[in-house]
Image: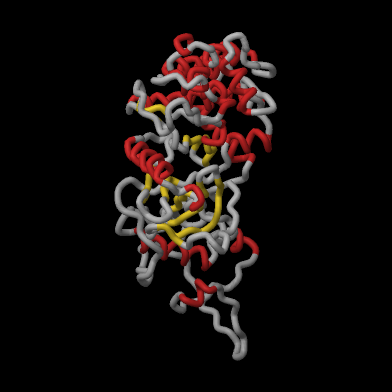
Amino acid sequence: MQITPLNPDDPASLGDFELLGRIGQGGMGQVYLGESLGGEPAAVKVIKPSVVDSESRRRFAQEIEVLKTIWGPRIAAFLGADAETERPWLATEYVAGPDLARHVETHGPLPSVLTAALGAILAEALAAVHTQGLLHRDLKPANILLGPNGPKIIDFGLAAFAESSVSLTAPHQVVGTPVCMAPEQAAGEKPLTPAVDVYALGAVLLFAATGHYPHQAATPYMVFHLVTDPDSAPDLSGAPTDLVPLLTAMLAHRAQDRPPLVEVVQRCRSVVEAHGLKIAQARRRLTAHTAREHGPTVPPPIPAPPLTAPFEDLPTETAPAAQEPAPEAGPVVPAPTLPAPTVVTDPPEPRASVTTEPGDTPHRSPAEQSAPSRPVKPPRHGAEASRAPRHSAQARMTAQRIRAAYAAGAPFAPSRSA
């Protein structure tokens, strides 16, 4: 979603939301990216001063009341509003992603299986809205945002109560998007039924799969004529073969001939399963597909470092320590901080003390420098060298210190090679 800077005449804040930039505009208002006092991002819609009157306030107030009653994982959540202030505003959940219209225009239509997954998601979301006694009435690609967690439906500004003549518009006035509008809605019939959202969803899915709508013409008036003409069949050219039967049913001219949303979900699932996928897999592919097209939104997690487990003496001077699973009994002990205790082992071979000449500085590793002084063994040669232990002084001290650190949580057998 493209964000542009605020204009000089834009407000700096509305309610408790600080405005950060512009993210869109419509016929009645401007939409801003806002941020709550707690840092929660929000899409803040404001009515344009030029259209603020009693009618627009009434419509805006009803939109607020409608949003307060709608909930669901695929619906942008209501965050706050004020319809009585000088500049009425409404804040909803911000979805970081483009709308479906922009995605198709930029990257082309969706594959058949992803279109079916989108249909199942949106049909289920609309069914939940209908259960709450509401209709969307203005479902279109621009009102479907493709976020990082999947698609979400926005803009219930034209929502009306199902099976009711209650409307936000005056009698005989039709408001909506003609290319996605059901014939009975375009004709001004009332009351409307859930079938209007079924038709609109069919138009959305056709656009997602082909890039065009059921009826298109040079002017809105001509589109209205095509939509309301029972002899004008919807244009399904380019639609995937496996989606044509479902789209034909959803775009039926008569409301009673359209399938209910529950059936739409099932038929979308059937298309997905015919491709050898489960619906959950197709949903994830849809989100991954749209996220990949628009770039990553969340950095990949950084893997946690592995836990170090107790181990025996190092086998050779140069071999790395092998990690083993930590024992079930006893907690993992942090790095050793106590001085190394004396470890009782088999009697060692006699050790000869070696002294250095004045001015000599023997090389010592950091571990040896922090360890107590101890006699240094002279180099061995010949047969004696073949019998020499394979452990360096550094390896022996490292193993000894680790034994001390883990002694409380894990028993160790005395080493027989020291």
Query: Residue 139: horizontal and vertical position, in percent?
Result: 50, 30
Taking the image as shown, residue 81 lies to the left or right of residue 298, namely left
Colouring of the image: secondary structure
How many discs appear?
A: 0
Query: Residue 117: horizontal and vertical position, in percent?
Result: 53, 25
- Residue, x 37% and y 55% (percent of image)? 85
Name the image quarter holding residue 60: top left
- Residue, x 61% and y 19% (percent of image)? 225
Give the camera-side residue of 304 and 1. 1
Taking the image as shown, residue 379 lies to the left or right of residue 122, namely right
Say above or below: 330 vs 290: below
Query: Residue 388: horizontal and vertical position, in percent?
Result: 56, 61
- Residue, x 40% and y 24% (percent of image)? 127
Say above or below: 125 vs 380: above
Give the camera-side residue of 330 and 76. 76
Residue 45 in sight here: no
- Residue, x 47% and y 17% (percent of image)? 264
Residue 100 in sight here: yes
Say above or below: 163 vs 139: above
